[in-house]
Every structure is written in structure tokens, then in C-alpha cells.
Image: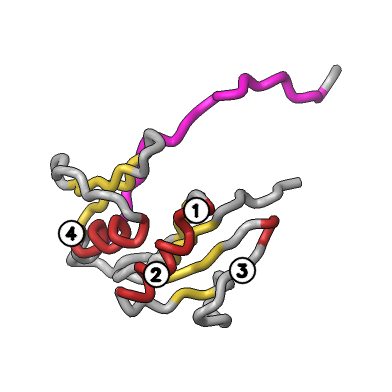
Amino acid sequence: MSLARPAVPATVARLDHTVVYASDRRLSAEFLAAVLGLEVGAPFGPFLPVDLGNGVTLDYYEMRDEPIQPQHYAFLVPEEQFDAMIARLEALDVTYYADPSHTAPGRVNDLFGGRGAYFDDPDGHNMEIMTRPYARP
């Protein structure tokens, strides 16, 4: 009996959207859109989408009666747009960090031959922009 995994097609599943909880969906969606240089879409039911341009949307959903549990969202961004994103963070007076623990303020990292930075959104979600994907084993 072989326990080898069967060959998997190149595209088994593709993320279409995910919900991001926010205390103020408009504030949070507009914040991320401003940093990434994107637009906030039209409301869709209780959701306010930010289209990432790759077929995936972040659908902001407002939760005012419960605390927001911070999550991590990482965005692979073009190298040529990275500096503009950092400049937008600075213009918004948002501190960015080289590390996910936020111990190196005002610095970017050079992981995997690219550049990256972490920052908090209005609800404390730990956002990451990076120009190279992680090298996974």
C-alpha cells in the first residue's frame, strides 16, 4: 500500500474573498485602499469590498458590539509600488515596522530578496506588504 500523495492539479482552489471584521467598515476599507492605492467598491449587502485586482476581495464587515480579534493579512505587492505605499503610510502618520512583532519601527525588511513592512490598520489587524513571497520548504 502506497501512502504517496496523488498529483494535485496546479489550481485546486483560488481564494475569492474573505471577510475582515471592523468596528467601522468604511474607515478600515478606505484606510487599506489608500495605503495600497486601490478603490473601495460599492456596498454589497453588509459588506464593503476592497478589490485587490487579482480576483480576490476583502469584504469589510462591521461589528460594533464585539471586540475585533486582530488577524494578519499579507499582500504581495509590485516592487515598483512599494516605496509609494511606504510614503502613503508616512503621509497617514502610520508607523510601519520591519518585523511582525513591531519592534523595528520606521524600517523595512529584506526577506527573501525583496522588501517588506508591517503596520496596523484602525482595528489592530497586522497588515503586511511584501515584494517577494516567502520561500517555503
118 w.r.t. 16: above or below: below
Residue 125 placement, left or right of 133: left
> Which residue in the structure is indicated by mark 1?
80
The amino acid pointed to by label 4 is Arg
Q: Residue at x 53, y 53 (%)?
A: 79
Near mark 1 (Cα within 10 A), the count class, few <14, some 14-19 or many ≥20, is few
Residue 118: % across, % down: 49, 68
Q: Amino acid at mark 3?
A: Asn
- Mark 4: secondary structure: helix
Q: Alpha carbon of mark 2 to alpha carbon of mark 3: how far?
A: 16 Å
Mark 2 belongs to which amino acid?
Ala
Q: Nearer the viewer, residue 51 or 11?
A: 51
Q: Is residue 63 above or below residue 5?
A: below
Q: Which mark is residue 109?
A: 3
| Residue at image mark 2 | 87
> What's under tag 1, amino acid-wise?
Glu
Earlier in the chain: of badge 3 and badge 1, it is 1
Number of residue marks: 4
> What residue is at 56 percent from the left and 82 percent from the top?
103
Above-or-below relation of 98 to 128 = below
